Amino acid sequence: MAGLVSNLLILFLVFQNICLGFRSPLSVFKRYKETTRLLSNECPGSDRPVISIGLSDFALDIRMRGVTPKQSDTYFCMSVPLPVDDEAYVVDFKPHASMDTVHHMLLFGCNEPSSTENYWDCDKGTCKDKSNILYAWARNAPPTRLPKGVGFRVGGETGGRYFVLQVHYGDVSAFRDKHKDCSGVTLHLTHQKQPLIAGMYLMMSVNTVIPPGEKVVDADIACHYKRFPMHLFAYRVHTHRLGKVVSGYRVRNGQWTLIGRQSPQLPQAFYPVEHPVDVSYDDILAARCVFSGEGRTTETHIGGTANDEMCNFYIMYYMEAQHAVSYMTCTQNANPEMFRNIPQEANIPIPVKSDMLKMMHGHHEETKDTDKSSLLQQAKKEEEEILDQDFHIEEAVEWPGLDLKLGQVSGLALDPENNLVIFHRGDHVWDENSFDSKFVYQQRGLGPIEQNTIIVLNPSNAKLLHSMGKSLFYLPHGLSIDKNGNYWATDVALHQVFKLGANNKEPLLILGVALQPGSDKNHFCQPTDVAVDPITGSIYVSDGYCNSRIIQFSPNGLYVMQWGEETSLGRARPGQFRVPHSLAMIPDFSQLCVADRENGRIQCFRLETGEFMKEIKHKSFGRELFAVSYVPGGFLFAVNGMPYPGEAEPVQGFVMNFSTGEIIDTFIPVRKSFEMPHDVVASADKTVFIGDVHARAVWKFAPTEKMEHRSVKKAGIEVQEIKESETIVEAKLKNNPESTESLKKQEKQHLVQQARTGVSFVLITTLLIIPVVVLLAILVFIRWRKTSVYGGKGSGGLNLGNFFASHKGYSRKGFDRLSTEGSDQEKDEDDGTDSEEECSAPPPPSAPSSS
C-alpha cells in the first residue's frame, strides 16, 4: 500500500513539473501587461499592449507614448519588447497614423534598443546592435498582409527580441493644439511555425543631388545578388515631394523584368508584385527614382528632413526557412552603363489624379484609374482571405431567452464576462404622444420606469444573473459596455447619457441636461448610442433623432469635438446623417462605424479626427439600417428595418467582411418573426443576439459550419457536394475524342444498369404484393361469410384505417395535417400605436420615424 502511494506521489510530481514546463501564453501576456503599467496611459500600448487571438495567435499594439513634437522634422523612437520568449512570426501589419501629422513610420527588429526611455530622439539611434526593417508606412497607406505560410521570424534563438518604432513628424503645425500623438502599428503574430520566412530588401540612393529647376533627375541603384533564391511578393516606393516615379527590376542575362512601378505621391503601401518574380544567384536588382527640381531655388540632397529627398525601393520577399536572411540592402550603382537599356516606362512619371489624392487623405471616392484600382482590389482580396468565412448563422432554437417577459427591447450589450445585458423599457412605450414638436417629453407625469430596466443573463441558458436601473430611466434607448464593465446608456426622453457601474445604484457620470433637448456642447436631442474607445477611453455619442452628429468627449466627460450634418436633398453625402442610430467601435482599424438608419447605410470614420473613411451600402439593406456590431478579426454584423410598402427587401441580419464591405451571410429567426429588430451584438465566437422593440424579444443566433466543397472526378464528370443536401453535377467533357467516347460508353452502361435495376425492382415488388393481396382477399371473404351466415349488419366495406389503427404501435404521425405555429399572428394589435413609430408608414423626409 505504501509503495502504491509513493508511486502515485511521484507521478503527481512529474505531472506537475510537466505542466509547469508549458507556460500558458495568457500567463506570459499577464506578466507582460504588468510590466507596462508603469508606462504612460496617454496612448494605446500602455494598458492593453497584447491581445490574445485564439490559442496560438496574438496581437501586439505598438504606439507612441503620447508625444507632442515641438519642431518640424522630429524623429521619435520607442521600443516594445517581444512579449514571449519563444519563436514567433509576424504575419500582419495594421497602421494607425495619418499623414496630417506623421510623415512616415519605420518598424525595426533588434535585440537591444538604443535607449530604455519611454521614447527618445532618434538621433541617439534606433538599435545598439544590428537592426532589420520589418515594416514601413507613409501617406495614409492601407494595411499590409503577408501571403499564407509566410512570416517575419522574431524571438527564439535567431529573431530579434525588441521592436523599435521610428516616427518622423514632418510638419508640426498640426500640433498647435498641443494634442498628444499615438501613432503606431498593430502586429498580428503567431506561434505556428511558418514554412517560409519573410525578409526586407532595401534599395536606397545615398548621393543623389537634385539641381534647382532641373526638369528630370534620375537616381539609379543596382547590386548583384549573391545568395540563395528569394521570391518577391510585395514592393513599396518612397520619396518626398519631388519624386515622380520609382521603378524596380530584376535583370537576368540582359532581360529586364518589372518588380513594381509606382508614384511615390500615392499611398505608400506595400503593393503586391503583379507577376511573381524570383531572384537567383548572380541576378542584378536595379531601381530608378525620377525627380524634378522645378520650383526649388537651391540644391536638394538625400537626407532625413521633409525638405530633403529620399530614393527608396523596398522589396518584401520570402525564402526557405533553412536559408532565410531577414534583411538586405543595396546602396550603390554597380553598373551605371546598364541603365541605358532600362525600359522606357521607368522614365515616364505617373500622373496623380485629384480623386486619388483625395483617397490618399482618406476620402474613398470612385476612381477610373484602372491600374491603381486593380492594385487596391488585389490588396482587398488578400485582406479578405484572413477571414474564416466558412460558416452560417442560424437561430439557437433551444435558447429559452426568447420567452422572457420584457418591455420594448431597445439595447443589447455583452459585458467583459460575455454575459448578455438587455436594456428594455418596462411598462413605458414610445408612441406618437411621447414628444411635442420641439422634442420635449410629454409624459413626465408617469414618472421613471419602476421596473429594473437593465437585466444581465447567462448567454447559454438565459438565467437571470443581475438586474438594475429601477426608477432611473424614462425611455431607454442605446446600451454599451466598456472594457472595465461600466454600462453606458442613453435615454431619449431625458436627452441624457449615463455611465453606470455594474454594482452602483447611482450614475458615475451624466452627460446632457435632463428633459432639455438642445444642439450645443452641453445638450443632446434624443441621443441614440454610446461607444467607448477601449484604448484611449474617449467617449463617442450618436446624437440622434433630432441632431445629426457624432460627439466626442474625453474619458471624464469633457467636450472634445463633433462631426456630421443633416442629410441634404438628393443622395446623402459622406458625413451626413439621417438618424445616426447605432455605433460600433472598430479598434483593429481605429475607426468608428455608424448605422445611418434612415439613409440605409453604414458610415465609418477615423477615431482620432472624425475623418470619413468609407461607406457600406447594399440594396438588400432596404431603406433603413438599424444597428451595427463589430467582432475583432474583421466581421461586421448588422440588422435592417421592415420593408416599406411595395418594397421587397426582407428584414434580416447580415454578416459582412469589414475590409471589403461584402455580405458573407444573412440570417432570420425560426421561432417567431422579426418585427422591428432594434439592436444587435456579437461575441468573438460569432454568437449573435438581436433585440426587437416591437416583438419585445431577444433572439440568439450561433454559427454552424458549412460542409466543405468536396469534388470527385471520374471520366470527365465532376460531382460537387455543397452544404448538407445540395448536389450539383457538372458534366465537363475533355477535348480529346477518347474521353468523349469513353463517356458515351459509360452512359450506355449506366442506362443498361438502370434498366436492369428497374426490372429487378418491379419483379421483387410484384412478388411481395401477391401474398398481401391474397391475405386481404381471404379477410374479405371471411367477413362476407360471417355477415351472410349470422345476418349481422355490414360495415359498408373494409376500413383499412381502422384495421391498422387497431394494431399496437400504430401512429398517425405523418398523415395528419401539420399544425403550424402562428407566431406572426401573436403580435399585439395595439403595437402600432403604443410602441415606437418605427415600422408603420414611411416617414416624411423632414421628420424621420423614431426608434
Image (cartoon, rainbow, N blue to C red):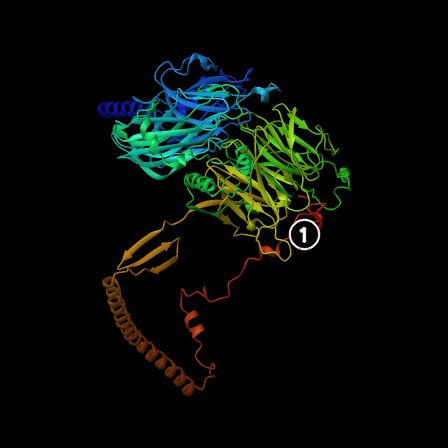
Q: Nearer the viewer, residue 184 or 636?
A: 184
| The N terminus sits in image quarter | top left
291 is higher (above) or lower (below) than 817: above
SS assignment at label 1: loop
The answer to whether residue 191 of the structure is visible from this angle is: no
Residue 781 placed where, x, y %? 37, 84
Q: Nearer the viewer, residue 248 or 667?
A: 248
Is 280 placed left or right of 48 in the picture? left
Residue 723 placed where, x, y %? 40, 53
| The C terminus sits in image quarter | top right
- Badge 1 crowding class, 10 Å Cα cut-off, few under 14, some 14 to 19, many 20 or more, is some
Amino acid at dot 1: Ser
Q: Name the quadrant containing residue 333.
A: top left
Which residue carries the number 1 mark?
840
Q: Name the quadrant containing residue 648.
A: bottom right
Residue 726 placed where, x, y %? 39, 57
The answer to whether residue 363 of the structure is visible from this angle is: yes
